Amino acid sequence: MPYVKQISVHKHPLKMIRYILNGDKNSEMKYSSGLNCTPDIKLSCQELSEVFEKFTGERFYKSSLNDADKQALKKQKVRLHHYIQSFAPGEATPEEAHRIGVKWAKKVFGDKHQVIISTHIDKGHLHNHFAVAAYNLEGKAWHSNIRTLKLCREISDKLALEHGLSIIKNPKRNASYKYGEWLARKNGTSWKVKLCEDIDHLILQDNVKSVDDLVGELRKNGYEVKQGKYISVKAPKQKHAIRTFRLGDGYDIQDLQYRISNKNEEMPLSEAIKYEGIQREYALCLRQLQITVYRNIENPVHVGYSDLRNSAELLSFLCNNNIHSVEDFESLVNSAADTAAELRQKKKSIEDEITQIQQICGPAEKFVELNSKATLSPQEIKTLLELKKTLPSDISSLDDVMKYRVRLEALKSQLGETSEQLEAVNIQKREYGRYYSYFIQQAQSDYDFIREQIKREQEEIKRAEQLKLLQEQGEQSRHINKWVK
Protein backbone atom coordinates (compact mmCIF):
# COMPACT_ATOMS: atom_id res chain seq x y z
CA MET A 1 0.00 0.00 0.00
CA PRO A 2 2.67 2.59 -1.01
CA TYR A 3 1.81 6.22 -0.29
CA VAL A 4 3.78 9.03 -1.95
CA LYS A 5 4.29 12.56 -0.63
CA GLN A 6 6.61 15.43 -1.63
CA ILE A 7 8.57 18.17 0.16
CA SER A 8 10.38 21.03 -1.59
CA VAL A 9 13.87 21.75 -0.25
CA HIS A 10 14.90 25.40 -0.48
CA LYS A 11 17.74 25.30 2.03
CA HIS A 12 20.02 22.75 3.70
CA PRO A 13 20.22 20.33 0.72
CA LEU A 14 23.32 18.70 2.21
CA LYS A 15 21.48 18.11 5.50
CA MET A 16 18.65 16.39 3.66
CA ILE A 17 21.06 14.19 1.66
CA ARG A 18 22.83 13.20 4.88
CA TYR A 19 19.50 12.16 6.37
CA ILE A 20 18.51 10.14 3.30
CA LEU A 21 21.87 8.35 3.08
CA ASN A 22 22.14 7.65 6.81
CA GLY A 23 23.74 4.21 7.11
CA ASP A 24 21.89 3.49 10.35
CA LYS A 25 18.62 3.73 8.45
CA ASN A 26 19.44 1.89 5.19
CA SER A 27 21.51 -1.01 6.55
CA GLU A 28 24.88 0.69 5.98
CA MET A 29 24.08 1.80 2.42
CA LYS A 30 22.92 -1.69 1.38
CA TYR A 31 19.64 -0.19 0.16
CA SER A 32 20.87 2.92 -1.65
CA SER A 33 21.13 3.70 -5.37
CA GLY A 34 21.69 6.66 -7.64
CA LEU A 35 20.41 7.64 -11.08
CA ASN A 36 23.00 9.78 -12.88
CA CYS A 37 24.69 10.47 -9.54
CA THR A 38 26.64 8.58 -6.88
CA PRO A 39 24.83 7.38 -3.72
CA ASP A 40 27.50 8.97 -1.52
CA ILE A 41 26.94 12.04 0.66
CA LYS A 42 29.92 14.13 -0.52
CA LEU A 43 30.00 13.00 -4.15
CA SER A 44 26.25 13.30 -4.72
CA CYS A 45 26.14 16.77 -3.19
CA GLN A 46 28.95 17.86 -5.51
CA GLU A 47 27.30 16.30 -8.59
CA LEU A 48 23.89 17.81 -7.79
CA SER A 49 25.36 21.25 -7.07
CA GLU A 50 27.25 21.32 -10.40
CA VAL A 51 24.05 20.78 -12.42
CA PHE A 52 22.01 23.23 -10.34
CA GLU A 53 24.61 26.01 -10.52
CA LYS A 54 25.17 25.45 -14.25
CA PHE A 55 21.54 26.11 -15.17
CA THR A 56 20.54 28.69 -12.52
CA GLY A 57 23.69 30.75 -11.96
CA GLU A 58 22.99 30.52 -8.21
CA ARG A 59 24.87 28.79 -5.42
CA PHE A 60 23.47 25.35 -4.52
CA TYR A 61 24.00 26.09 -0.84
CA LYS A 62 23.44 29.68 0.32
CA SER A 63 24.10 30.45 3.97
CA SER A 64 21.89 33.54 3.67
CA LEU A 65 18.86 31.24 3.37
CA ASN A 66 19.38 29.91 6.90
CA ASP A 67 17.76 32.98 8.43
CA ALA A 68 15.16 33.54 5.72
CA ASP A 69 11.49 33.39 6.70
CA LYS A 70 8.91 31.21 4.93
CA GLN A 71 7.78 33.96 2.57
CA ALA A 72 11.35 34.73 1.50
CA LEU A 73 12.09 31.02 0.98
CA LYS A 74 9.11 30.64 -1.36
CA LYS A 75 10.69 33.16 -3.70
CA GLN A 76 13.93 31.15 -3.84
CA LYS A 77 14.58 28.41 -6.37
CA VAL A 78 13.98 24.87 -5.16
CA ARG A 79 17.30 23.10 -4.56
CA LEU A 80 15.93 19.57 -4.34
CA HIS A 81 12.62 17.75 -4.35
CA HIS A 82 12.26 15.26 -1.50
CA TYR A 83 9.84 12.44 -2.21
CA ILE A 84 8.85 9.75 0.28
CA GLN A 85 7.23 6.45 -0.72
CA SER A 86 5.86 4.60 2.32
CA PHE A 87 4.80 0.95 2.39
CA ALA A 88 2.24 -0.67 4.66
CA PRO A 89 3.85 -2.77 7.43
CA GLY A 90 4.67 -6.22 6.19
CA GLU A 91 3.78 -5.77 2.52
CA ALA A 92 7.32 -5.81 1.12
CA THR A 93 10.85 -6.89 1.98
CA PRO A 94 13.63 -4.25 2.07
CA GLU A 95 15.02 -5.63 -1.21
CA GLU A 96 11.63 -5.47 -2.92
CA ALA A 97 10.85 -1.99 -1.58
CA HIS A 98 14.17 -0.73 -2.92
CA ARG A 99 13.63 -2.34 -6.34
CA ILE A 100 10.20 -0.71 -6.55
CA GLY A 101 11.76 2.63 -5.57
CA VAL A 102 14.38 2.46 -8.32
CA LYS A 103 11.76 1.47 -10.93
CA TRP A 104 9.49 4.27 -9.75
CA ALA A 105 12.26 6.89 -10.03
CA LYS A 106 13.15 5.76 -13.57
CA LYS A 107 9.52 5.79 -14.76
CA VAL A 108 8.68 9.17 -13.17
CA PHE A 109 11.83 11.20 -13.87
CA GLY A 110 13.29 9.45 -16.92
CA ASP A 111 16.91 8.70 -17.79
CA LYS A 112 18.23 12.29 -17.73
CA HIS A 113 17.49 13.19 -14.13
CA GLN A 114 19.66 12.92 -11.02
CA VAL A 115 17.94 10.97 -8.26
CA ILE A 116 19.22 9.42 -5.01
CA ILE A 117 17.17 6.48 -3.72
CA SER A 118 17.51 5.17 -0.18
CA THR A 119 15.28 2.61 1.56
CA HIS A 120 14.93 3.15 5.32
CA ILE A 121 14.26 0.03 7.38
CA ASP A 122 14.57 1.50 10.89
CA LYS A 123 10.83 1.86 11.53
CA GLY A 124 7.86 -0.47 11.66
CA HIS A 125 7.10 0.33 8.01
CA LEU A 126 9.56 0.42 5.11
CA HIS A 127 9.83 3.68 3.20
CA ASN A 128 11.89 5.00 0.29
CA HIS A 129 13.44 8.48 0.31
CA PHE A 130 14.27 10.22 -2.98
CA ALA A 131 16.45 13.30 -3.41
CA VAL A 132 15.47 14.61 -6.86
CA ALA A 133 17.43 17.30 -8.67
CA ALA A 134 15.48 20.48 -9.41
CA TYR A 135 16.86 20.46 -13.00
CA ASN A 136 17.73 17.49 -15.22
CA LEU A 137 21.00 17.11 -17.14
CA GLU A 138 19.58 19.19 -20.04
CA GLY A 139 18.44 22.04 -17.79
CA LYS A 140 14.73 21.23 -17.77
CA ALA A 141 13.11 22.03 -14.41
CA TRP A 142 10.96 19.51 -12.56
CA HIS A 143 7.74 21.16 -11.40
CA SER A 144 6.18 19.70 -8.28
CA ASN A 145 2.44 20.35 -8.32
CA ILE A 146 -0.89 18.55 -7.99
CA ARG A 147 -0.65 17.14 -11.52
CA THR A 148 2.85 15.67 -11.13
CA LEU A 149 2.08 14.35 -7.63
CA LYS A 150 -0.97 12.56 -9.06
CA LEU A 151 1.26 11.06 -11.76
CA CYS A 152 3.77 9.95 -9.11
CA ARG A 153 1.06 8.18 -7.12
CA GLU A 154 -0.47 6.54 -10.19
CA ILE A 155 2.90 5.07 -11.21
CA SER A 156 3.54 3.97 -7.64
CA ASP A 157 0.15 2.21 -7.53
CA LYS A 158 0.81 0.48 -10.85
CA LEU A 159 4.16 -0.86 -9.64
CA ALA A 160 2.59 -1.95 -6.34
CA LEU A 161 -0.06 -4.00 -8.15
CA GLU A 162 2.61 -5.58 -10.37
CA HIS A 163 4.39 -6.73 -7.20
CA GLY A 164 1.24 -8.04 -5.54
CA LEU A 165 0.94 -5.17 -3.04
CA SER A 166 -2.27 -3.38 -2.08
CA ILE A 167 -3.07 0.24 -2.93
CA ILE A 168 -5.13 2.94 -1.25
CA LYS A 169 -8.44 3.05 -3.16
CA ASN A 170 -10.56 5.28 -0.92
CA PRO A 171 -8.43 7.24 1.58
CA LYS A 172 -10.32 8.27 4.70
CA ARG A 173 -9.72 11.17 7.03
CA ASN A 174 -8.72 10.42 10.57
CA ALA A 175 -11.66 10.38 12.96
CA SER A 176 -11.67 12.51 16.10
CA TYR A 177 -13.99 13.26 18.98
CA LYS A 178 -16.58 15.94 18.53
CA TYR A 179 -16.35 18.74 21.08
CA GLY A 180 -19.44 17.57 22.98
CA GLU A 181 -18.04 14.06 23.39
CA TRP A 182 -14.63 15.42 24.41
CA LEU A 183 -16.25 17.64 27.06
CA ALA A 184 -18.41 14.75 28.35
CA ARG A 185 -15.35 12.53 28.67
CA LYS A 186 -13.48 15.29 30.45
CA ASN A 187 -16.34 15.83 32.91
CA GLY A 188 -16.86 12.09 33.45
CA THR A 189 -20.46 12.15 32.16
CA SER A 190 -19.94 10.30 28.87
CA TRP A 191 -22.05 7.17 28.38
CA LYS A 192 -19.20 5.80 26.28
CA VAL A 193 -16.87 5.96 29.27
CA LYS A 194 -19.51 4.10 31.28
CA LEU A 195 -19.72 1.47 28.51
CA CYS A 196 -15.93 1.01 28.58
CA GLU A 197 -16.03 0.56 32.36
CA ASP A 198 -18.80 -2.03 32.06
CA ILE A 199 -16.88 -3.96 29.39
CA ASP A 200 -13.70 -3.87 31.51
CA HIS A 201 -15.63 -5.20 34.52
CA LEU A 202 -17.45 -7.94 32.59
CA ILE A 203 -14.28 -9.24 30.92
CA LEU A 204 -12.85 -10.16 34.34
CA GLN A 205 -15.87 -12.26 35.33
CA ASP A 206 -15.22 -16.03 35.44
CA ASN A 207 -18.24 -16.84 33.24
CA VAL A 208 -16.97 -14.64 30.38
CA LYS A 209 -14.72 -16.93 28.34
CA SER A 210 -15.40 -15.61 24.83
CA VAL A 211 -16.65 -12.56 22.96
CA ASP A 212 -20.05 -14.27 22.70
CA ASP A 213 -20.18 -14.52 26.50
CA LEU A 214 -19.29 -10.83 26.76
CA VAL A 215 -22.08 -9.89 24.33
CA GLY A 216 -24.54 -11.92 26.38
CA GLU A 217 -23.52 -10.18 29.61
CA LEU A 218 -23.82 -6.74 27.98
CA ARG A 219 -27.40 -7.59 26.96
CA LYS A 220 -28.19 -8.68 30.53
CA ASN A 221 -26.97 -5.25 31.67
CA GLY A 222 -29.50 -3.46 29.45
CA TYR A 223 -27.40 -2.82 26.32
CA GLU A 224 -28.66 -3.54 22.82
CA VAL A 225 -25.92 -5.41 20.97
CA LYS A 226 -25.51 -6.39 17.32
CA GLN A 227 -22.72 -8.82 16.55
CA GLY A 228 -21.26 -9.41 13.08
CA LYS A 229 -18.07 -8.20 11.49
CA TYR A 230 -18.14 -5.54 14.23
CA ILE A 231 -19.84 -5.33 17.60
CA SER A 232 -22.31 -2.42 17.82
CA VAL A 233 -23.63 -1.41 21.24
CA LYS A 234 -26.53 0.92 22.03
CA ALA A 235 -26.86 2.10 25.62
CA PRO A 236 -30.24 2.68 27.31
CA LYS A 237 -31.73 6.10 26.49
CA GLN A 238 -29.24 6.61 23.62
CA LYS A 239 -30.51 7.16 20.06
CA HIS A 240 -27.53 5.66 18.23
CA ALA A 241 -25.28 2.65 18.65
CA ILE A 242 -21.49 2.72 18.56
CA ARG A 243 -19.05 0.15 17.21
CA THR A 244 -16.77 -0.98 20.00
CA PHE A 245 -13.54 -0.34 18.08
CA ARG A 246 -14.41 3.37 18.21
CA LEU A 247 -14.20 3.28 22.00
CA GLY A 248 -10.41 3.21 21.85
CA ASP A 249 -7.53 0.78 22.21
CA GLY A 250 -8.52 -2.67 23.49
CA TYR A 251 -12.16 -2.68 22.35
CA ASP A 252 -12.17 -4.11 18.82
CA ILE A 253 -13.14 -7.78 18.49
CA GLN A 254 -9.58 -9.10 18.28
CA ASP A 255 -8.38 -7.13 21.30
CA LEU A 256 -11.46 -8.07 23.31
CA GLN A 257 -10.83 -11.78 22.62
CA TYR A 258 -7.17 -11.35 23.61
CA ARG A 259 -8.15 -9.62 26.85
CA ILE A 260 -10.70 -12.34 27.66
CA SER A 261 -8.19 -15.12 26.96
CA ASN A 262 -5.51 -13.56 29.15
CA LYS A 263 -7.63 -11.96 31.91
CA ASN A 264 -4.98 -9.34 32.71
CA GLU A 265 -2.38 -11.87 33.86
CA GLU A 266 1.15 -11.54 32.51
CA MET A 267 3.12 -14.58 31.36
CA PRO A 268 5.06 -16.17 34.24
CA LEU A 269 8.81 -15.59 34.05
CA SER A 270 9.35 -19.35 34.36
CA GLU A 271 7.43 -19.84 31.10
CA ALA A 272 9.20 -17.04 29.24
CA ILE A 273 12.71 -18.40 29.89
CA LYS A 274 11.81 -21.83 28.46
CA TYR A 275 12.14 -20.39 24.94
CA GLU A 276 15.48 -20.09 23.12
CA GLY A 277 17.08 -17.48 20.83
CA ILE A 278 14.87 -14.64 19.66
CA GLN A 279 11.83 -16.64 20.82
CA ARG A 280 12.99 -16.08 24.40
CA GLU A 281 13.62 -12.40 23.62
CA TYR A 282 10.04 -11.94 22.42
CA ALA A 283 8.54 -14.01 25.21
CA LEU A 284 10.27 -11.67 27.65
CA CYS A 285 9.21 -8.70 25.53
CA LEU A 286 5.57 -9.84 25.60
CA ARG A 287 5.73 -10.33 29.36
CA GLN A 288 7.13 -6.81 29.83
CA LEU A 289 4.44 -5.33 27.60
CA GLN A 290 1.79 -7.14 29.65
CA ILE A 291 3.24 -5.76 32.87
CA THR A 292 3.27 -2.26 31.37
CA VAL A 293 -0.39 -2.40 30.30
CA TYR A 294 -1.92 -4.41 33.14
CA ARG A 295 -0.15 -2.48 35.90
CA ASN A 296 -0.61 0.88 34.13
CA ILE A 297 3.12 1.67 34.16
CA GLU A 298 4.07 4.92 32.42
CA ASN A 299 6.63 4.64 29.63
CA PRO A 300 8.00 6.93 26.89
CA VAL A 301 6.13 4.97 24.20
CA HIS A 302 2.40 4.28 24.39
CA VAL A 303 1.65 0.58 24.75
CA GLY A 304 -1.86 -0.77 24.23
CA TYR A 305 -3.76 -4.03 23.90
CA SER A 306 -3.02 -4.17 20.18
CA ASP A 307 0.70 -4.24 21.05
CA LEU A 308 0.07 -7.16 23.41
CA ARG A 309 -1.86 -9.04 20.74
CA ASN A 310 0.72 -8.33 18.03
CA SER A 311 3.56 -9.52 20.27
CA ALA A 312 1.66 -12.68 21.22
CA GLU A 313 0.98 -13.41 17.54
CA LEU A 314 4.63 -12.76 16.71
CA LEU A 315 5.79 -15.19 19.39
CA SER A 316 3.45 -17.88 18.03
CA PHE A 317 4.70 -17.17 14.51
CA LEU A 318 8.33 -17.57 15.58
CA CYS A 319 7.55 -20.89 17.27
CA ASN A 320 5.38 -22.28 14.45
CA ASN A 321 8.05 -21.49 11.84
CA ASN A 322 10.99 -22.68 13.96
CA ILE A 323 12.66 -19.25 13.87
CA HIS A 324 15.49 -18.94 16.42
CA SER A 325 17.62 -16.16 14.93
CA VAL A 326 17.43 -13.01 12.84
CA GLU A 327 18.99 -14.95 9.96
CA ASP A 328 16.22 -17.57 10.14
CA PHE A 329 13.61 -14.80 9.96
CA GLU A 330 15.24 -13.00 7.01
CA SER A 331 15.65 -16.29 5.13
CA LEU A 332 11.93 -17.06 5.52
CA VAL A 333 10.85 -13.60 4.33
CA ASN A 334 13.27 -13.55 1.39
CA SER A 335 12.27 -17.06 0.32
CA ALA A 336 8.60 -16.01 0.09
CA ALA A 337 9.57 -12.89 -1.88
CA ASP A 338 11.70 -14.95 -4.31
CA THR A 339 8.87 -17.45 -4.83
CA ALA A 340 6.44 -14.59 -5.55
CA ALA A 341 8.88 -13.07 -8.06
CA GLU A 342 9.29 -16.42 -9.85
CA LEU A 343 5.53 -16.90 -10.06
CA ARG A 344 5.03 -13.35 -11.37
CA GLN A 345 7.57 -14.04 -14.11
CA LYS A 346 5.92 -17.39 -14.91
CA LYS A 347 2.50 -15.72 -15.08
CA LYS A 348 3.83 -13.04 -17.43
CA SER A 349 5.42 -15.65 -19.71
CA ILE A 350 2.12 -17.55 -19.93
CA GLU A 351 0.19 -14.32 -20.63
CA ASP A 352 2.66 -13.41 -23.39
CA GLU A 353 2.30 -16.85 -25.02
CA ILE A 354 -1.51 -16.64 -24.79
CA THR A 355 -1.46 -13.26 -26.52
CA GLN A 356 0.85 -14.62 -29.20
CA ILE A 357 -1.38 -17.67 -29.93
CA GLN A 358 -4.55 -15.54 -29.91
CA GLN A 359 -2.96 -13.36 -32.57
CA ILE A 360 -2.27 -16.51 -34.65
CA CYS A 361 -5.57 -18.42 -34.44
CA GLY A 362 -7.90 -15.94 -36.18
CA PRO A 363 -5.61 -15.15 -39.14
CA ALA A 364 -4.66 -18.87 -39.36
CA GLU A 365 -8.27 -19.90 -39.98
CA LYS A 366 -8.54 -17.24 -42.68
CA PHE A 367 -5.29 -18.50 -44.23
CA VAL A 368 -6.53 -22.13 -44.31
CA GLU A 369 -9.83 -21.02 -45.84
CA LEU A 370 -8.11 -19.07 -48.65
CA ASN A 371 -5.49 -21.75 -49.19
CA SER A 372 -8.16 -24.39 -49.80
CA LYS A 373 -10.06 -22.38 -52.44
CA ALA A 374 -9.67 -23.42 -56.06
CA THR A 375 -9.69 -19.88 -57.42
CA LEU A 376 -8.76 -16.61 -55.73
CA SER A 377 -9.33 -12.98 -56.55
CA PRO A 378 -6.32 -10.66 -56.77
CA GLN A 379 -7.16 -9.20 -53.32
CA GLU A 380 -7.47 -12.72 -51.85
CA ILE A 381 -4.10 -13.67 -53.33
CA LYS A 382 -2.55 -10.57 -51.74
CA THR A 383 -4.14 -11.40 -48.36
CA LEU A 384 -2.98 -15.02 -48.60
CA LEU A 385 0.62 -13.98 -49.29
CA GLU A 386 0.60 -11.47 -46.39
CA LEU A 387 -0.77 -14.09 -43.99
CA LYS A 388 1.81 -16.64 -45.13
CA LYS A 389 4.60 -14.20 -44.22
CA THR A 390 3.32 -13.57 -40.70
CA LEU A 391 2.03 -17.03 -39.66
CA PRO A 392 4.14 -19.98 -38.47
CA SER A 393 5.20 -22.39 -41.23
CA ASP A 394 3.56 -25.42 -39.57
CA ILE A 395 0.01 -24.21 -40.33
CA SER A 396 -1.54 -25.73 -43.46
CA SER A 397 -4.87 -27.17 -42.30
CA LEU A 398 -7.63 -26.73 -39.72
CA ASP A 399 -6.05 -29.59 -37.73
CA ASP A 400 -2.95 -27.45 -37.36
CA VAL A 401 -5.05 -24.53 -36.17
CA MET A 402 -6.81 -26.83 -33.70
CA LYS A 403 -3.44 -27.76 -32.16
CA TYR A 404 -2.88 -24.08 -31.40
CA ARG A 405 -6.38 -23.78 -29.92
CA VAL A 406 -5.77 -26.82 -27.69
CA ARG A 407 -2.50 -25.26 -26.58
CA LEU A 408 -4.36 -21.99 -25.90
CA GLU A 409 -6.90 -23.70 -23.61
CA ALA A 410 -4.10 -25.49 -21.76
CA LEU A 411 -2.29 -22.19 -21.24
CA LYS A 412 -5.45 -20.53 -19.92
CA SER A 413 -5.87 -23.34 -17.41
CA GLN A 414 -2.20 -23.04 -16.44
CA LEU A 415 -2.62 -19.27 -16.08
CA GLY A 416 -5.51 -19.78 -13.67
CA GLU A 417 -3.49 -22.19 -11.53
CA THR A 418 -0.44 -19.90 -11.53
CA SER A 419 -2.58 -16.88 -10.60
CA GLU A 420 -4.03 -18.80 -7.64
CA GLN A 421 -0.54 -19.86 -6.54
CA LEU A 422 0.70 -16.28 -6.84
CA GLU A 423 -2.21 -14.94 -4.80
CA ALA A 424 -1.55 -17.52 -2.07
CA VAL A 425 2.16 -16.69 -2.00
CA ASN A 426 1.42 -12.96 -1.95
CA ILE A 427 -0.82 -13.47 1.07
CA GLN A 428 1.92 -15.52 2.72
CA LYS A 429 4.54 -12.91 1.79
CA ARG A 430 2.44 -10.11 3.30
CA GLU A 431 1.96 -12.14 6.48
CA TYR A 432 5.69 -12.85 6.78
CA GLY A 433 6.51 -9.23 6.00
CA ARG A 434 4.02 -7.94 8.57
CA TYR A 435 5.61 -10.00 11.32
CA TYR A 436 9.10 -9.09 10.14
CA SER A 437 8.23 -5.36 10.17
CA TYR A 438 6.92 -5.64 13.72
CA PHE A 439 10.09 -7.55 14.60
CA ILE A 440 12.24 -4.72 13.15
CA GLN A 441 10.16 -2.11 14.96
CA GLN A 442 10.70 -3.71 18.35
CA ALA A 443 14.29 -4.69 17.69
CA GLN A 444 15.56 -1.38 16.34
CA SER A 445 13.58 1.65 17.38
CA ASP A 446 10.33 2.00 19.25
CA TYR A 447 10.81 -0.15 22.32
CA ASP A 448 14.21 0.76 23.78
CA PHE A 449 12.73 0.89 27.26
CA ILE A 450 11.37 -2.65 26.88
CA ARG A 451 14.76 -3.96 25.83
CA GLU A 452 16.35 -2.29 28.85
CA GLN A 453 13.80 -3.89 31.15
CA ILE A 454 14.36 -7.27 29.48
CA LYS A 455 18.11 -6.84 29.86
CA ARG A 456 17.73 -6.24 33.57
CA GLU A 457 15.47 -9.30 33.87
CA GLN A 458 17.95 -11.45 31.98
CA GLU A 459 20.75 -10.30 34.28
CA GLU A 460 18.59 -11.23 37.27
CA ILE A 461 17.87 -14.64 35.70
CA LYS A 462 21.58 -15.19 35.12
CA ARG A 463 22.43 -14.28 38.72
CA ALA A 464 19.67 -16.59 39.99
CA GLU A 465 20.99 -19.46 37.84
CA GLN A 466 24.54 -18.86 39.07
CA LEU A 467 23.34 -18.77 42.68
CA LYS A 468 21.38 -22.00 42.16
CA LEU A 469 24.48 -23.65 40.66
CA LEU A 470 26.62 -22.56 43.62
CA GLN A 471 24.02 -23.89 46.03
CA GLU A 472 23.91 -27.24 44.19
CA GLN A 473 27.71 -27.41 44.22
CA GLY A 474 27.73 -26.63 47.94
CA GLU A 475 25.14 -29.34 48.59
CA GLN A 476 27.22 -31.86 46.64
CA SER A 477 30.33 -30.91 48.63
CA ARG A 478 28.49 -31.49 51.91
CA HIS A 479 27.36 -34.95 50.75
CA ILE A 480 30.90 -35.86 49.66
CA ASN A 481 32.42 -34.66 52.96
CA LYS A 482 29.79 -36.63 54.89
CA TRP A 483 30.56 -39.78 52.89
CA VAL A 484 34.36 -39.35 53.34
CA LYS A 485 33.94 -39.01 57.10
Image (tube, grey):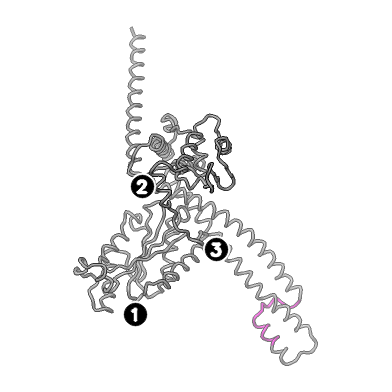
Nearer the observer: mark 1 or 2; the answer is 2
Discs 3/2, front: 2
Quarter of the rendering containing residue 104: bottom left
Q: Is residue 357 magenta?
A: no
Q: CA distance from mark 3 to mark 1?
A: 36 Å
Q: Would you name the residue on which mark 1 appears?
A: 138
**Residues at marks 1 and 2, CA–CA distance in whole angstroms:** 44 Å
In the rendered view, tell whether residue 16 sits above or below residue 208: below
Residue 126: x %, y % from top left? 41, 56
The magenta stretch is: 383-397
Mark nearest the camera among 3 and 1 is 1
Q: Which mark is residue 99?
A: none
* Pointer 3 or 1: first along the chain: 1
Mark 2 falls on what kind of element? loop
Q: Assign the C terminus to one quadrant of the image.
A: top left
Please report the residue visible at 45 percent of the width from the left and 60 percent of the height from the top. 2
Residue 463 % position (x, y): 32, 28
- Crowdedness near tag 2: few (<14), some (14–19) or many (≥20) residues, C-alpha within 10 Å: some
| Residue matched to label 3 | 345
In the drawing, does residue 261 fall left or right of residue 307? right
Is residue 280 visible in the rendered image? The answer is no
Task: Determine crowd level at label 3: few under 14, some 14-19, many 20+ residues with C-alpha closer than 10 A.
Answer: few
